[in-house]
Image: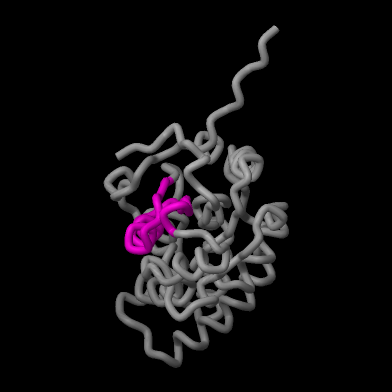
Amino acid sequence: MNILPLDLSSFDAAIIDLDGTMVDTIGDFVVALNLMLDDFSLGYVTARDVEAMVGKGSEHLIRSTLRHVRGNEADEALCDAAWQRYTHHYLVINGRHSAVYPGVLEGLEALRAQGLRLACLTNKPNDFARPLLAAKGLDGYFEFVFGGDAFERKKPDPLPLQKTCAALGTPPARTLMIGDSSNDAQAARAAGCPVVLVTYGYNHGEPIRGVDADAFVDSLAEISPPCPAARP
């Protein structure tokens, strides 16, 4: 199914993912993870490694990174220590090695101009997500920002979308989910939200067009159709 061009009058709100959808944060992840690994003399990861591991929350990312460099599962003590060091480093470098994707500002402006209420929903911890949005000048677009630690469960569980719809006061069927991965699509499907996926993000190393979604776009600017040109 493809619902583009969108009739935005069918929606009251949009929920938008952060990493891989609005901001390319792989550089931040790589730097923070490698600083963490250096603290334990455990080697390093590359951007390609991280692209396949990111998207399911920081705890999953740290465990996956430790497994990748060690070749086996890390014990809880190492995971806890790694989390502390990762948090320390990430808060220092947050946003310094990342960039807003082309078309994001135009897309957000167009959605807001159509009267849609906007929320950012990410598996990134709140303490990372909010400063990043502020650093990139995106925070003013959103009524709500919910990180991966805002609710009892993370995407792909539908609970975060259900809770975000409740905060917005909009029914799921009239709330568009915009993301970059199967996590976003699975959560949206289970919550009853239509879903559009961007083609440039992080989908655990898998082709994005193989994911069950209503539409795919190469830029957020494509989601809202351009205003018709004025007649001379």
| Closer-to-camera residue (65/145) | 145
Residue 149 placed where, x, y %? 53, 77
- State yes or no: residue 184 in magenta: yes
Q: Which quadrant does the C terminus fall into? A: top right
Q: Which residue is depicted at the point 53% across and 63% down?
A: 121
Is any atom of residue 143 visible in this view?
yes
Which residue is at 66% across, 66% downward?
Answer: 130
Report the side of 3 relative to 118 (left or right).
left
Residue 202 seen from this side: no
- In the image, residue 49 sits, relative to residue 88, either above or below, namely above
Q: Position of residue 133 (x, y in %)?
A: 66, 59
Residue 214 image point, x, y percent: 35, 44
Looking at the image, residue 138 lies above or below residue 3: below
Q: Quadrant of the N terminus?
A: top left
Question: How many badges with numbers are in the image?
Answer: 0
What residue sits 33% from the left and 58% below the top? 189
Q: Residue furthest bottom?
A: 77
* Residue at 48 percent of width and 54 percent of height: 175
Q: Compared with residue 80, is residue 137 higher up or lower down, i.e. above or below?
A: above
From the viewer's perspective, is residue 65 above or below residue 78? above
Q: Is residue 73 magenta?
A: no
Furthest-top residue in view?
Answer: 232
Q: Give the quarter of the image for residue 29.
A: bottom right
Residue range of the region highlighted in magenta in the rendering: 172-197
Left or right: 155, with 82 as reference point: left
Residue toward you, 195 or 138: 195
Q: Quadrant of residue 65?
A: bottom left
Which colour style is shown?
one colour
The percent coordinates of residue 18 (x first, y second) are 54, 57
